[in-house]
């Protein structure tokens, strides 16, 4: 078992945010940890109380919550058949739309939309969760439109069109890497000939730097990690895993890690001076960083018989154990981080029953419990330890309205804020009270 200090992550909270907010993908610090106390340890017999539910349109984008505002990104389709087939890129017409709702009532406060023609695989809607920082909302659409809006009013302050402005090709499954706000910068995976990664001025949209020309956008969001006291940007693009300098985008280190079909998806996870990264078809890797060396050491590389190869959901590491969903089988697995050895697996919080490609549960940790949002639309409370999966309860919160590999799925990550959980599918967004009574 690895005995390492907890990871140091750059806090991405806006100045007015508090611990009760969920201002971006995977929470306040982007590590899937929900720090609020006084939340349900188990569900009551009738499940948690629904506070409100309102109609929504299509999307894989999870909601973001800051203060009394919920930000939802969606696609209102006008024409076309949104068939979900990895070998097809159907043409749709419609509008991408960012909506701001009252967190207590679901009442719409403002909305902004724009016409958007879709030509991507799995075209139900945008993939990226809104990022809220310093009174601004940053949204990246599936076809590459990046918008900065005022959080209070919805007024657009600047926008970029990645294909038009930078000649970036649209990835097969659309642009899916959530915008990352770091200080005065917004960092995005653009995939342009001049730079796979670009940093924009958060106030004006001006390009501050470009990095990794011609490497492709992939689908993995950029991540900030502090490794031996050195804060850096960690990027997994379709050709490899890279550390970049935040100030100018210069490469600090590079490790070859090429996923099939460019499917760099799940974000790298840091644990002390270690970094895990993994993807489709048995791909996984653990690196160790030494303050005396510029290039990290490889601890192990996994395969189809070891570790875990995640895709839709990003794994979590807790006390030296890695918990993640395998893209090939759909099982939730526990893995000994030090060796890559599999400890156990279960389908209970993912598909609910049996093996299925890309079976998904979105993992969030709160103290010694995990809240697992299943693709079945159920929220599961469980204890995950190296020894076992211990389910404490589950409640059906929303219907699985999407389709994948012949089954119904709900593939949007939830938000946990102010003792509530916010969940969405392609038809509804709902808020449930998770306060301990």
Image (cartoon, rainbow, N blue to C red):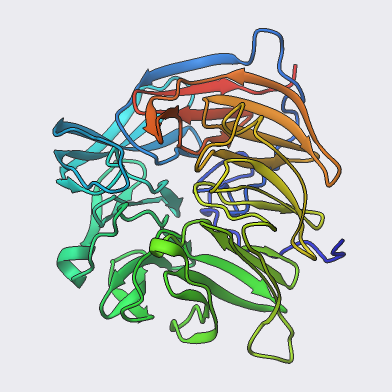
> Is residue 417 something one can see in this rendering?
no
Q: Residue at x 54, y 14 (%)?
A: 50
Q: Residue at x 62, y 26 (%)?
A: 353
Image position of 357 with respect to 426: above or below: below
Q: Residue at x 71, y 29 (%)?
A: 381
Measuring from the top left, give residue 186's x and y in whole percent: 40, 65
* Quadrant occupied by the C terminus: top right
**Is residue 369 shown left or right of residue 103?**
right
> Is residue 116 something one can see in this rendering?
yes
**Is residue 267 shown left or right of residue 230?**
left
Residue extending furthest toward the top = 46
**Is residue 94 shown left or right of residue 271?**
left
Measuring from the top left, give residue 218's x and y in whole percent: 39, 63
Instruction: Out of 289 and 409, give the one closest to the viewer.
Output: 409
Measuring from the top left, give residue 135's x and y in whole percent: 41, 50
Measuring from the top left, give residue 247's x and y in whole percent: 47, 81
Q: Residue at x 50, y 48 (%)?
A: 25
Image position of 180 with respect to 353: above or below: below
Instruction: Out of 311 and 26, give the one closest to the viewer.
Output: 311
């Amino acid at each position: 078992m690895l005995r390492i200090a907890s990871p140091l992550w750059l806090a991405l909270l806006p100045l007015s945010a508090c611990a009760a907010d969920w201002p971006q993908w995977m929470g306040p610090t982007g590590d899937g940890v929900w720090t609020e106390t006084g939340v349900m340890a188990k569900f009551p017999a009738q499940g948690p109380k629904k506070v409100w539910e309102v109609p929504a349109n299509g999307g894989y984008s999870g909601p973001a919550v800051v203060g009394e505002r919920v930000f939802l990104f969606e696609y209102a389709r006008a024409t076309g058949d949104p068939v979900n087939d990895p070998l097809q890129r159907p043409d749709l017409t419609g509008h991408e739309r960012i909506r701001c709702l009252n967190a207590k009532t679901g009442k719409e406060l403002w909305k902004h939309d724009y016409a958007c023609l879709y030509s991507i695989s799995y075209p139900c809607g945008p993939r990226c969760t809104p990022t809220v920082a310093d009174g601004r909302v940053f949204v990246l659409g599936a076809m590459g439109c990046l918008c900065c809006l005022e959080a209070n009013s919805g007024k657009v302050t600047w926008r970029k069109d990645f294909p038009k402005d930078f000649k970036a090709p649209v990835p097969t499954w659309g642009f899916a890497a959530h915008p990352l706000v770091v200080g005065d910068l917004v960092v995005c995976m653009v995939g342009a000939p001049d730079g796979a990664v670009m940093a924009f001025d958060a106030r004006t949209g001006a390009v501050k730097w470009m990095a990794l020309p011609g490497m492709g956008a992939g689908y993995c969001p950029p991540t900030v990690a502090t490794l031996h006291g050195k804060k850096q940007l960690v990027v997994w693009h379709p050709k490899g895993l890279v550390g970049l300098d935040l100030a100018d985008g210069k490469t600090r280190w590079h490790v070859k890690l090429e996923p099939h079909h460019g499917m760099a998806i799940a974000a790298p996870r840091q644990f002390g001076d270690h970094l895990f990264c993994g993807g489709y078809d048995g791909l996984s890797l653990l690196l160790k960083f030494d303050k005396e060396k510029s290039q990290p050491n490889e601890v192990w590389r996994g395969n189809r018989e070891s570790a875990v190869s995640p895709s839709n959901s990003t794994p979590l590491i807790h006390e030296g154990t890695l918990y993640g969903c395998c893209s090939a089988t759909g099982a939730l697995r526990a893995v000994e981080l030090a060796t890559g050895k599999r400890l156990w697996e279960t389908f209970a919080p993912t598909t609910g029953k049996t093996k299925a490609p890309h079976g998904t549960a979105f993992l969030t940790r709160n103290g010694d419990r995990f809240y697992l949002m299943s693709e079945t639309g159920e929220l599961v409370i469980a204890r995950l330890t190296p020894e076992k999966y211990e389910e404490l309860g589950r409640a059906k919160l929303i219907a699985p309205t999407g389709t994948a590999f012949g089954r119904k799925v709900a593939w949007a990550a939830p938000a946990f804020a102010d003792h509530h959980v916010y969940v969405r599918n392609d038809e509804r967004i709902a808020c449930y009270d998770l306060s301990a009574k």
